[in-house]
Image (cartoon, rainbow, N blue to C red):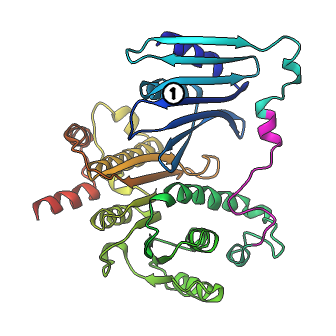
Amino acid sequence: MEKLRALLEESLTGELYQMTAGGPRKKDGDIRLRVRPVMLGDRLLFQLENFRGNQVFHRNLAKEEAEQAVLEAMADFRQLSVKTRRFEAEAMVSKKGKVTVKRRETVPGQAGNVPDPLRMAHNRKKKYILEEGKPVPFLVDLGVQTADGRTVKSRYDKFRQINRFLEFIADVMPILPKDRCVRIIDFGCEKSYLTFAMYYYLHELNGLDIRVTGLDLKEDVIRRCSALAEKYGYRKLDFRQGDIADFEGEDRVDMVVTLHACDTATDYALYKAVKWNASAILSVPCCQHEVNRQIRNETLEPMLKYGLVRERLSALVTDSVRACLLEEQGYDTQILEFIDMEHTPKNILIRAVKREKRRENTAQKTGIKEMTEFLQVNTCLQRLFEKQEHS
């Protein structure tokens, strides 16, 4: 695969227009992979779009990560098309892994007439799901937009966050049932920017029959959100005060959303989602204190003695364990970037989609057990699933 690696090394620059992998070898895997350069702040990244059935999954990766991801993906594709400012290429991969590359250079004298891909991206106005300049009632009331639809400058990060969240919702929407009311629970809804956005997008813009419940501990939050839902005529959006661990009264839930549920509250939300056999789970974890208190390892002590490093490592360990446990429970799970690091360090989103056919994954179970024993941790979600197995 060295020819393919060399092609990727040369292609993954700011001069790339688009890279597309096609000709899938498997019926149940990705049907297409698309790669393009993007600028996030002053960082050149590469956006990978994996097309699987009716879903599209996005990742923004650094060059080395993108190169490795494409190389691994090409085990399942027959061809890779590349178009840059300087050349076009077509790579064919045989069943045995033999790579044939055909390449055509851009004709000298014409390259200067070809626009820079990244300059085009900078100049192109970002198209959001909730369009700028078009007032949305709940965004106006929540102070994100003015009455004429302009985004309030100090709340632009919130506007971007809401739209990014709706992109994740759009990805999982095709798997939600269309022949009955879709049941959605939002654990830890707080001020409910994203709860209202989700209801507006699924019901008002896409006509899906849904019933959404937002749960939060704060009485004043529930009172305000309930008043807004009534004001907008959102009949099937209700808010309840309560603790996630104690939430009962539902037999079937199609999608569970948990946004910044603190510490082990996220674990209880994920556990309940699995018990309900939810088709989709979207979780943005927060404040992973449990592992921070437990983590011990003599070999890693030079790292763990620094509080900030310990805190971040604990958060990554917690969310990795959560994602793997969801895999074991029959979900295709990804850990994705929610919003840019420059806005908040809590930028991880766990997205889990229920597999049609559950597959055994003993090797992964062993891996989690070994990793947590190595770090001397035992998470809340592990204990919940262990208790379930023995009950």
Q: With respect to residue 241, does 157 lie above or below?
A: above
Q: Which residue sits furthest left?
A: 390
Residue plotted at (41% across, 15% down): 97
Residue type at mark 1 is: Val
Q: In this view of the protein, can residue 294 be seen by the observer?
A: no
Q: Does 363 appear in magenta?
A: no
Count the marks.
1
Label 1 residue SS: helix
How far from the left and from the top, in percent, is residue 126? 75, 50
Q: In this view of the protein, can residue 50 be seen by the observer?
A: yes
Quadrant of res 191? bottom right
Magenta: predominant secondary structure element?
loop
Of residues 237 and 86, the one drawn nearer to the viewer in this rendering: 86
The residue that mark 1 highlights is 70
Residue plotted at (58% across, 19% down): 8
Q: Does 124 appear in magenta?
A: yes
Quadrant of res 35? top right
Of residues 128 and 240, the one drawn nearer to the viewer in this rendering: 128
Q: With respect to residue 320, does 156 lie above or below?
A: below
Residue plotted at (53% across, 15% down): 4
Magenta segment: 119-135
Quadrant of res 112? top right
